[in-house]
Image (cartoon, grey):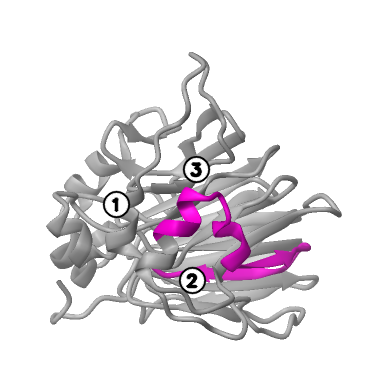
Amino acid sequence: MPNYYKFTPLLKTLIWGTESWQISGVPGNETVTDASSVQTLNELVKELQGRLVGKANYRRFGDEFPLLIKFIDAHQDLSIQVHPTDEIAHRQGKPRGKTEMWYVMDSAPTATLYNGLKQQITPEEYKQMVENNTICDALARYNVKEGDCFFIPAGRIHAIGAGCYLAEIQQTSDVTYRIYDYKRRDKDGNLRELHTELAAESINYTVLKDYRQQYTPQKNEGQLLVECPYFNTAVYDLTEPMAIDYSELDSFVILIGLKGEGTLDIDGEEVAFGKGDTILLPAYINNVRARGTVKFLETYVLSDDSAD
């Protein structure tokens, strides 16, 4: 069986910029392998089951791959939005909610984003602020630069701003509720749809002092960024060879190239790897040796027998 899989990205041009779906099992938007025997990602899961995603992950998620990986290039501000939790999504007739994270890449000097509430508001105040176009006044806004990381659990209001270029790791879900959209119109001249009531059911009104993930950048060792029930993600910034042992990990691993160029030796098979590359390692892979001057994200899912 192959030691790794690459997929043909799905490129999407949107009103605010572009998205490249690197790895996706979202129904109707599945990426396909770029190998000679072309398969969709979920066909691959159905065929290999726990050998691909890990035994516990296969029990938990079945034949649908659990993560969606994107590169996002925002030329304009995205809408102010929120995603539901799994529990709320089920009540609303959706298959699952959406927890995600962002890792900021080489973005414009003026790039900003919103993540979380900066002041306490009530559900009634939320609706009033949406109606009078002041909801942004209640949100924490960040100037961002390469290396910044943000975790967006389901229920947290957020928005990517113009000039941001980032990698997004999220649950396999395309459920997004628009709260505010700067009164933009679609290609037919109509105001874009808002989802005020659905969003109201989904918002977590907890206020934190800081929504940026705190970590100390280090060369040549993995730095944990996010650890949650849906994914664990670390960043590696290598200038010398490094061996990574996955022999005890019951999960697939996705490696996302952020910067630089190098090679990966995957259980003895070598492949070029660098900026813009996304590689899926099956759960049966034991060892990877990375070489070159290369920066990348590593993400996987840890499940146990008690998981839903």
Name the residue located 45 percent from the left edge and 32 percent from the top edge.
34
| Residue 28 at x, y percent in the picture | 29, 31
Crowd around label 2: few <14 · some 14–19 · many ≥20 (10 Å): some
Magenta span has 213? no
SS for callout 1: helix
Name the residue located 19 percent from the left edge and 49 percent from the top edge.
94
SS for callout 2: strand
Question: In the image, which residues are magenta?
Answer: 127-155
Q: Nearer the viewer, residue 27 or 140?
A: 140
Q: For residue 22, which numbered disc appears in the image? A: 3
Magenta span has 128? yes
Residue located beneath label 2 in the image: 287
Name the residue located 17 percent from the left edge and 53 percent from the top edge.
92
The mark that comes first in sequence, 1 or 3, is: 3
Q: Inspect this view and state whether residue 19 appears.
A: yes
- Up the image or down, 254 lies above or below 194; here it is below
The mark that comes first in sequence, 3 or 2, is: 3
**Label 1 with label 3: CB-CB less than 8 Å:** no
Is 232 situated left or right of 295 in this image? Answer: left
Name the residue located 66 percent from the left edge and 75 percent from the top edge.
242
